[in-house]
Amino acid sequence: MANTILVGAQWGDEGKGKIIDVLTEQADVVVRTQGGNNAGHTVWVGKTKYVLHLIPSGILWKGKTNVVGNGVVVDPVALVGELDGLEKLNVKVEGKFFISETAHLVLPYHRELDAQREVLKGKNKIGTTKRGIGPAYGDKVARVGLRMIDLVNPERFAAKLKDRIKENNAVLKALGAKPLSYKKVHDAYRAAGDRLKPYVTNTVVLLHEAMRQNKHILFEGAQGTFLDIDHGTYPYVTSSNTTAGGACTGSGVPPHRMDRVVGVMKAYTTRVGEGPFPSESPEISDLLHGMGREFGSTTGRARRCGWFDSVVTRHATMVNGIDEIAITNTDGLDTVENIKVVIAYRLDGKTLNHLPNDLEELARVEPVFAEFEGWCTPTDQITEWKKLPAKCRAYLRAIAELSGAKLKIASVGPGREQTMFL
Ligand code: GDP
Ligand code: IMO
Ligand code: MG
């Protein structure tokens, strides 16, 4: 299958976990390269549901190597919880799971600061997952972060943590929040460090060794293109590069070793958290929430829903270099008679074919819609492309064409078997 980068082409939750799981069959190694446990990737295997936050979605296959790369921010206590959860479900990780020595740590002061900053922002809050992601990446860039390699070295960890707690407690106190107990944090993190130590390694060397053996690597994007720190709807974004370039910096695999980019998109659009969303529609939100769908896998929040926006996905194709498209949740539109798709925006009498970078403008754009006749037939039992209703195929082909890449996968349900390759 060659080395493949998989990215979300919208605002996250596109169904990346499901598509990664399906593509893992043809891969040898699956790597997370950015984000942290703000991600929630859902995979169904038969009747069992798994929600993965830090561990790559390839973990459910036997004989595949799974890597948390250097670009990920790791909350070690949360990771131990996730490993325990998988073990309870009889998923073995021994010998097939590795964490980069240089991945940065998320510490309790990051979570506390994340929460405090949201309170201070009031109505301008980002709507973060409160997992401490922004402050952890902030410390990484400010060169005051702690890394996995520190966590597994007890003396060094103790000394560095002491310094960081001192500074952060001063900040927390100034914000009126409770200071943290060094001892409590130290003990909990050291226990997690001992538990994780067997998995901590030089993952850059591991990945290059795999490539030397002609193994196929699948890079599992977290979040989505419009949550990218550079290319997203800043400041309503996450704090990492969620776009294809992040797969290189977050793993140590150079750009010329990447063979293709797969963009995952829903047949409609969702967003969780604050920020502009031009195609948002109460009609489609009510429909999907009424079906019990579109509640967040990490925080349980109801996702905001809207029509498919091809201005957004075209931009995603451009910045990620998407070659192939996987469209998920096609079945979510099974009962809609008239399906709308955004093909451009209007602003102050002008037609825009790209998203304006000025968020105030993006918040004011009016979508220009194309309409498609719905297929009004259940699709979730269909397993062959040719058997999908003609109107459904036409819709999927049209939105892929509008997005500017080749339609490769259509998904009509959360299960592995509810996936069609074109
Ligand atoms: P991710 O963060 O991109 O991995 O996506 P999430 O797992 O957060 O959210 C996607 C949701 O859609 C999950 O509940 C999946 O099980 C579900 N899903 C994925 N593909 C399909 C599909 O084609 N149809 C339906 N009904 N659900 C799907
Ligand atoms: P997956 O990988 C959807 C959103 C949050 C918030 C913003 C910043 O499951 O697609 P953060 O906690 O990262 O500082 O929050 O980003 N967000 C996601 N939305 N899916 C995700 O991950 C997300 N991870 C973060 O809701 O708007
Ligand atoms: Mg998700």
Image (cartoon, rainbow, N blue to C red):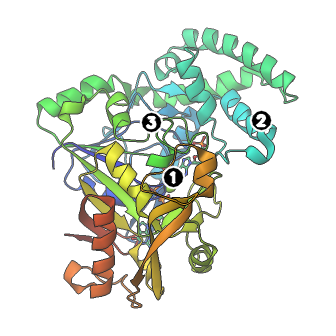
Residue drawn 41% across and 78% down?
A: 331
Q: Nearer the viewer, residue 3 or 340?
A: 340
Characterize the local packing of mark 1: few (<14), some (14-19) or many (20 or more) Cα atoms within 10 angstroms: many
Q: Nearer the viewer, residue 351 or 402?
A: 351
Does the closest atom of ligand 2 sit within 8 Å of the Cβ of label 3? no
Q: Position of residue 381 (x, y in %)?
A: 34, 84
Mark 2 lies on residue = 116
Characterize the local packing of mark 3: few (<14), some (14-19) or many (20 or more) Cα atoms within 10 angstroms: many
Q: Where is residue 8 in the image (x, y as percent from the top left)?
A: 41, 52
Q: Give the spatial CA distance, label 2 vs label 3.
A: 24 Å
Is disc 1 in contact with disc 2, using a CB cutoff of under 8 Å?
no
Sequence-wise first label, 2 or 3 = 2
Q: Which of 343 and 298 is in front in this view?
A: 343
Q: Give the spatial CA distance, label 1 vs label 2.
A: 23 Å
Residue drawn 60% across and 56% down?
A: 272
Instruction: Give SS at disc 2.
Output: helix
Compared across the picture, whether 323 is left or right of 304 comes to left
Does the closest atom of ligand 3 sit within 8 Å of the Cβ of label 1? yes
Q: Position of residue 405 (x, y in %)?
A: 25, 58
Q: Position of residue 336 (x, y in %)?
A: 48, 85
Mark 1 lies on residue = 40
Q: In which quarter of the image is ligand 1?
A: bottom left
Residue drawn 65% across and 45% down?
A: 128
Mark 3 lies on residue = 241
Q: Considering only vertical position in the picture, is 72 above or below 331?
A: above
